Amino acid sequence: MEPCPDYKETLWLDVYDELDPNERPSWERHLEACEACREERKQLLGMIQSVKEAVPSSELSHERAQAIASSIKRKMNNEREDIWWRKNLFGTSNWLIPAFATACLLIVALSWFSLKEFKKPAAVQMISDLALEEQIISEDLDVIINLDILQEMEVLEKLVKLLDKKRDNNTSIQRESKINYGGAYV
């Protein structure tokens, strides 16, 4: 038979004798009413008893238990002493720790102020870079202002090339007509 699903955990806690005393009365009332849970509890208790009989446990003597307990206490005390902030820093005495911390703070403060000094030349260089950019922008501005003139010059160049081409064509036609018609202009 399968025990009640709601009481499986309670069954296991009861079998291992770990059930909360406050829950025991309701569990015993359930066992009186439920045949499946009673049967499962009986089987589990029998199985645990047979395992205990088959594998005898070694008894721990009182002296051995005391030795183990004192060994554990010693190790716990040693671990507590091994905490880094309780130890001496780098094998030095404890009075050097504040001096070391002060030296670190001074180094950090001095480096911070020196970084401010290093930034000043960068600002001067930025000003010179701005002047160079302004020069480039003013040259570009001249090109933009004169862009209309440049475009007109391009159109004029194309027109001149076209006229030169037409003139060359007319000159070659006139030469051919002179040759064909005896030098008379047509």
Image (cartoon, grey):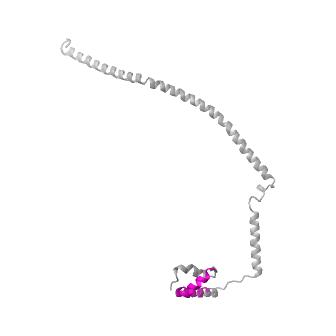
Q: Is residue 35 magenta?
A: yes
Q: Give the range drawn in magenta.
A: 22-48
Q: In which quarter of the image is residue 63?
A: bottom right
- The image shows a total of numbered marks equal to 0
In which image quadrant can residue 106 be found?
A: top right
Residue 109 percent across, percent down from the top left: 72, 43
> Is residue 162 found left or right of 50 in the rendered image?
left
Please report the residue visible at 67 percent of the width from the left and 37 percent of the height from the top. Answer: 118
Q: In which quarter of the image is residue 69?
A: bottom right
- Give 27 or 133, whichever is nearer the viewer: 27
Task: From the viewer's side, name the closer residue of 52 and 23.
Answer: 23
In percent of the image, x 25 and y 18: which residue is there? Answer: 170
Image position of 26 (left or right of 178)? right
Report the magenta stretch's main SS: helix
In this rendering, is residue 39 above or below 153?
below
Give the quarter of the figure containing the C terminus: top left
Horizontal side of 76 relative to 2 (left or right) equals right
Q: Is residue 12 above or below residue 92?
A: below
User: Looking at the image, which residue is at 72% across and 41% down?
Assistant: 110
User: Which residue is situated farthest in the left direction here?
Assistant: 181
**Which percent across, then down, holds residue 37?**
54, 85
Find residue 24 and report its horizontal and vertical position in percent: 61, 82
Give coordinates of residue 54: x percent, y percent: 63, 87
Taking 110 as reference, is 185 left or right? Answer: left
As drawn, the residue found furthest toward the top would be 184
**In this picture, is 50 found above or below 120?**
below
Is 167 in front, or is 119? 119
Is 77 magenta? The answer is no
